[in-house]
Image (spheres, grey):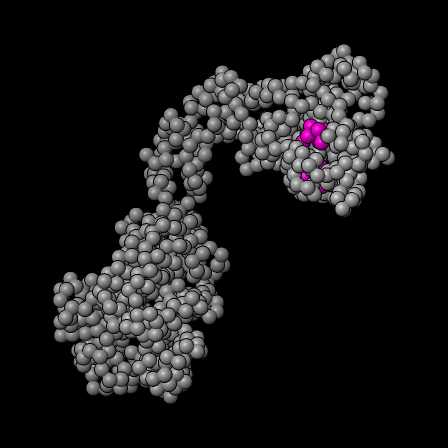
Amino acid sequence: MSKKLFDNQRIVAVLGPTNTGKTHLAMKRMLNHKSGIIGFPLRLLARENYDRALTIKGQGQVALITGEEKIVPPYAKYFLCTIESMPLDRNVAFIGIDEIQMCADPDRGHIFTDRLLFARGKLETMFMGASTIRPLLRKLIPKIQFETRPRLSSLKYIGKCKVASLKPRSAVVAFNVGEVYSFAEQIRRQRGGSAVVLGALSPRTRNAQIEMYQNGEVDYLVATDAIGMGLNMDVDHVAFASTRKFDGRKRRDLLPAELAQTAGRAGRYKNDGTFGITGNIRTLEKDAIEQIESHSFEALKFLFWRNSRLDFSTLKRLQQSLAQPPIISGLLRAREADDELVFKRLSEMKEIIQLANNPYSIELLWKVCHIPDFSQTLSDAHAGLLSVIYHYLMGENKNGTGHLPTDWLASQVSRLDNTQGDIETLSGRIASIRTWTYIAFQSNWLEDYKHWQGTTRVIEDKLSDALHQRLTQRFVDKRTAVIVNHIKKTEKIPAFVNSNGKVTIEGYKFGVISGFRFQPDNINLIVDNTAMKKITNAAIRALKGEVTTRLKKLVSDDDSQFKLGKKNKLPIIVWRGHLVANLEAGSTLLKPVVVPLTDDLLEISERKILCHRCQSWLNNTLKEIFAPLLAALSSPNLSGPSRGLIFQLGENLGCLQRHQATSLINSMSKSDRKSLKPFGIRIGRHWVFIPTLLKSRAIAMRGLLWGIWNDTIVADPKPGLVSIPIDSDLPQDFYRSIGYDCFQKLAIRCDIVERLASIAWKLSSKGAFKLDKNASQLMSLAGCGVKDIEKILQMLGYVRKLGENNFQYFERNRNSRTSSNYVKSDLKQKKDENKIKKQSPFASLEGLLEDL
């Protein structure tokens, strides 16, 4: 129809708050006419009312038109549409516009205003919305008639309520995705789950979530203000978790009328509703509360407008016509919408300027700019996609047909046909496929548009179903819901445990017994203390016999059923795969303390039994690993110097730098040295050590003991490595405690250090030696490169010299001691020297032997 004002038809505005039956009235009036169109603000509402009209008029007479969906029978008389998709060229008896106050919306208001000014039915035009627009409607359309409809139920403010205390059939409203997910997760833990409604969800996903709520599968709903537009749900209470939102440009406080639009979802038909606040909001303004309860708000001062009579003669004139200001009082130039913003980007591209050089090509470019970016990013990627599409439609790319190439389209669409991924991934794919669905409904852009309409719809439905499943899995816990309901009805909760330690309540898995502790199955019921006590007592009763049986088995098992492990970098004792005890520092390095991992399932006497058995196994293990060291420490037939050297070895877990005991070694006789051989003690040039304590198992145990003593648990070196990189955050003391010597960035096992020193000694016995093939021998032994071996030799007391042809030679530094005389490295010491030092690892030799 032509865009001019029609004053000879009946034009009526049906105004009032939510839950007044305005949309129901409009549908009834349209279907009483021979033809009609109603424009809705949401695709979801258009679809809902299309289904309603189908049941009354039948498929042949009813059409659905949205940006992503078109169902238009040849002889359709009634059209349910989104506001942007209304077919205004059709001559129909009735036209209706829902939520007409959306004329004041900063983003889409100009489209509603255009329909307000120019969309007319032959016999009747109806605008439905809030009373705030009434003065401007009278000003813009002087002959308009008004019909005020009162709310069918009351709406009352009840103050603040914690999420845990919200009554069933409540909706929590937040204004960003993160807050929605956070509250949904909280309700899942506390009440078993909630449905989730976001504007970014596809209509199919939103419908599935709402249906789950309506069917009573969950009693709670967490949503953005997307629920404020006409979604009919059985909500008794609306709790605002926030009163600020990002409107596409900035964060701002919501107006009382905007809060009322969402709060009005509480109460349906003649059922009264309530609203309030929750979360971190302290209070609502008193004036806002009064306005919402009385449905009395400040009238709108202006409506947004954008010129719809566009000039496509040149790109510049199109921009100028878009920027034209309104000439009617009460209208305000709308801020640049998404289509304008992307048009600006494209019209600055040289290749686009060359193509858009006539009215047809410019109008086509403007239509391409209408392609929505459902991800709402306004990114360069979206502008780039539109540029490619425009080139294809102009016939500038490979096919030259003026259509989108089938192969290219298939590649773009097929990559989205994937239902794997998390909520965010699936939401992103749905946003992308909705864009392609919109493109598929531009029939003159594709060669086989019906095929692509079906393909994109199938993919969107698959993704939507997968997203609904992910949302349900994440935010609905039916076990918790069952338990909470059971608590309300009974005094005792029957709990059962099977042979695998799984604990069930009312047939639902509630947790497992691990070792001697009960671990709930990720269920954190935040209910009153009485309810929690019931659940705990039920679990204890069910598990009492099980833990008694396990304890008897642990005591009777031999040592082979125990082993050491780590959890969260902490040392633990594992029995038959169960964590049963932690290890903490004791009075000496070789005396770690066993701390049982248990809760109220074991009595005090039973905990002592568990602790004693674990400590017994640990002592036996230490005796086995450190057998030669302990044998030497307990030998009575040793001289004073020998006993002193062995005691120092004990303090250092079996490896000692020679310079630390120089005086003792120098005072030992040949017979003293010989007396050490039965214990495997070797006195080398740089180290005194016991070779059996350099095996992988012993090294791991030594590292664990050092970590427990120093409260710093370190990962074990890989078994069999003779050299390892040094972690600068660890003190050199750690590496020496496990039998490795530090050479700046490399730690080498002490027995290998001795072998390197022996080889270098022999090579230097006749003077300086050349580092040629000898380098390979030494590097292979140390497991390092040329630069490392050069540094190792220098730190072992050898001097580097340049020989003929600048080749490197090394000779023994005659002034250095044969014992260790290393250059001190600049490694950081992790331990703070100002901290109070712990006592010596061994209070006395007698104390060590008595403990083990």
Q: Is residue 7 visible?
A: yes
Q: Which residues are magenta?
A: 742-757
Residue at the extreme front: 805
Name which residue lies at 36% across and 44% down. 477
Quadrant of res 368: bottom left
Name which residue lies at 44% across and 76% down. 349
Residue at the extreme right: 815
Percent x, y for residue 133?
34, 77
Q: Is residue 53 above or below residue 483?
A: below
Q: Answer whether residue 337 is magenta in the image.
A: no
Q: Is residue 295 visible?
A: no
Name which residue lies at 75% across and 21% down. 646
Q: Horizontally, is 594 left or right of 542 in the view?
A: right
Check the picture and name the quadrant holding the N terminus: bottom left
Q: Is residue 11 above or below residue 220?
A: below
Percent x, y for residue 186?
43, 49
Quadrant of res 732: top right
Percent x, y for residue 523?
42, 40
Percent x, y for residue 242?
45, 60
Residue at the extreme bottom: 327
Foreground of the two, 120 or 615: 615
Name which residue lies at 85% across and 34% down. 814
Residue at the extreme top: 637
Q: Horizontally, is 702 left or right of 12 in the view?
A: right
Check the picture and name the quadrant holding the C terminus: top right
